[in-house]
Image (spheres, rainbow, N blue to C red):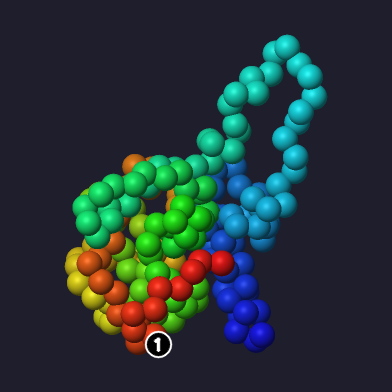
Amino acid sequence: MLSRISQFGARLLRENRAAAYLPNSRSSYYRGQFSRHFAPAKNTLFSTTSNHDEDPQDKDKISVTFVNKDGTEQTISVPVGMSILEAAHENDIELEGACEGSLACSTCHVIVMDVKYYNKLEDPTDEENDMLDLAFGLTETSRLGCQVIAKPELDGMRVALPAATRNFAVDGYVPKPH
């Protein structure tokens, strides 16, 4: 139970840090994962002037392309403030994330394919570098998916999934995302 509370607190801190990158941001802990669940209902009043085909939440999303192990590509929309790991899980992309984003493993290792986008990311922390040292197929542009937070400057980013992961806890087990 305590680890769940710690993970929740860590997620709140990450999302609060990511909120600094949002345009016109208001200070709030309820961003990213939480704001999608508790967002106010869309105005559904009848109007002849409103455009109901355009979803205002689409403006707060970026496009990210995942290059899978077999070379196939999958492009998804990622809400600003969400981690690449969470986005992958929501879109059934095989990015493991054994520690559920608590920065305790390297199974969400991704390779940013363009240095231009890699340079737009914040520098990895010492903790992330320690976990990356354990990653399979480490490159100069490797990052942990749980630490890459979507922001508008990353629109169009391409990330590759490495050929394998190292899960020291349970080798060969593929967990189901929650």
Q: For mark 1, give the secondary structure.
A: loop
Classed neighbour count for the residue bearing mark 1: other residues with Cα under 10 Å, few (<14), some (14–19), many (≥20) = few
Return the residue nearer the eye: 167 or 137.
167
Q: Quadrant of residue 45?
A: top right
Q: Amino acid at mark 1?
A: Ala
- Residue shown at 54%/41% (left/top)? 60
Q: Quadrant of residue 128?
A: bottom left
In percent of width and height, residue 69 lies at 24, 60
Position of residue 96 relative to residue 28, above or below, is below
In percent of width and height, residue 148 lies at 41, 61
- Residue shown at 36%/44% (left/top)? 75
- Residue shown at 70%/13% (left/top)? 49
Return the residue nearer the eye: 95 or 133.
95
Return the residue nearer the eye: 25 or 83.
83
Residue 134 in the figure: left or right of residue 90: left
**In which quadrant is the C terminus drawn?**
bottom right
Count of marks, rendered view: 1
Residue 89 in the figure: left or right of residue 4: left
Position of residue 45 relative to residue 145, above or below, is above
Residue 110 in the figure: left or right of residue 50: left
In percent of width and height, residue 146 lies at 44, 66
**In which quadrant is the N terminus drawn?**
bottom right
Residue farthest toward the right in the current orientation of the protein? 45
In percent of width and height, residue 139 lies at 19, 67
Residue farthest toward the top in the current orientation of the protein? 48
Question: Residue beneath label 1, please?
Answer: 169
| Residue 122 visible in the shown view | no
- Residue shown at 43%/81% (left/top)? 104
| Residue 5 visible in the shown view | yes
